Amino acid sequence: MVRARSRRSCWFMHPGKKQWMNQASSVVYGLAAYKLLPSQQTDIKVAANDDRQQRQQEELQSPHRFARLLYWFAILCITALFSGSLRRSAQIRLVSDKQSFRFWVFSQQTSAGYCAGYGHCISEHIRPFWTIHGLWPTNAESWPKVCNKTINFNISVFDVIRNDLEMYWPSVRSMNSSAFWRHEWQKHGSCGLQVFHVNGMFRYFNETLSLLHTYNVTTFLIDEGIFPTINRTYTVVELYKALTDNLRSKANIVCRKVNGFAYPVLTEVRLCLSKYGLELIDCQIDSYGCGNSSVYYLPVGEGNRSQLDGCPNTL
């Protein structure tokens, strides 16, 4: 049917066109006559499928390969970051749980009372105002101490605050205040490295000086009309009220029995501070060694000067 339709249409053509159409028809007839054997068709399909699968695998492998590279690159970056963090953490990590604590105790002492209660002191280091005894981490029941020995004490670290330390944090029992500061750092300061405000020697001492200026017991007592004197005593209630009115929190007062005095002698006032913010919190213990009646708040003066001279050169 195809050949008959082609022949009839060619009779109306120009002879040159007729010849061209006959040639084209021959090609069509040849193509139509040629058929692939079944085995040849299968081989071609298999080859085509193989090529298509290979291209698909290559397309799939390319993003997978890139993803794997990104994965291992991320692993390397994370490992580098964590290794640096772990090295820093290892410097302050403890073998035991000694560094764990709940809050801080900030202790201020009166030179006259402390020296009367604990022994003779260096007169050059006596101050007429309350000075720093220490900033100590605590669990209330226990005191973590000497938590880290990897950071050596270096007095030059806080040269810029050295004069303030000499004035407000002197060792009343030693000519060498730096030995006292070393003791406070190694025993107490080294246990607070997990707290940002005090996680280093300079920060520890500088922050403690700042606490003294913020919570100054000398000023609190003067504001309530309480002055050091040998001529009278103050009740424990008076002392508590003077501190509470200014602090708005419960403090802890420490006293000591001293020969020659009918009542305990006031030696320290301890404030309790939150672990991380170093903000005032209530102390659980109101007093230690003060009793419930009266205490002496001794001045630095000629009346008890003999108690303050000739201190042995020890901490």
Image (spheres, helix red, strand yellow):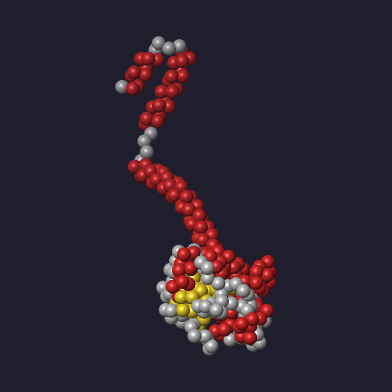
User: What residue is rendered at 44% in x and 49% in y?
Assistant: 60
> 21 or 221, which is in the foreground?
221
Tell me if I can see residue 192 in this picture: no
> 118 or 158, which is in the foreground?
118
User: What residue is rendered at 62% in x and 68% in y?
Assistant: 202
* Side (left or right) of 296 relative to 122: left
User: What residue is rendered at 46% in x and 18% in y?
Assistant: 19
Location of the C terminus by quadrant is bottom right
> 93 or 304, which is in the foreground?
304
Residue sitting farthest toward the front: 231
> 17 or 240, which is in the foreground?
240
Vertical order, 111 against 14 (above or below): below
User: What residue is rendered at 40% in x and 29% in y?
Assistant: 30
Residue 63 drawn at (x, y percent): 47, 50
* Side (left or right) of 69 relative to 205: left
Tell me if I can see residue 4 in this picture: yes
Vertical order, 202 against 52 (above or below): below
* Side (left or right) of 102 relative to 196: left
Residue 106 drawn at (x, y percent): 52, 72
Residue 41 drawn at (x, y percent): 37, 42
Residue 16 drawn at (x, y percent): 48, 14
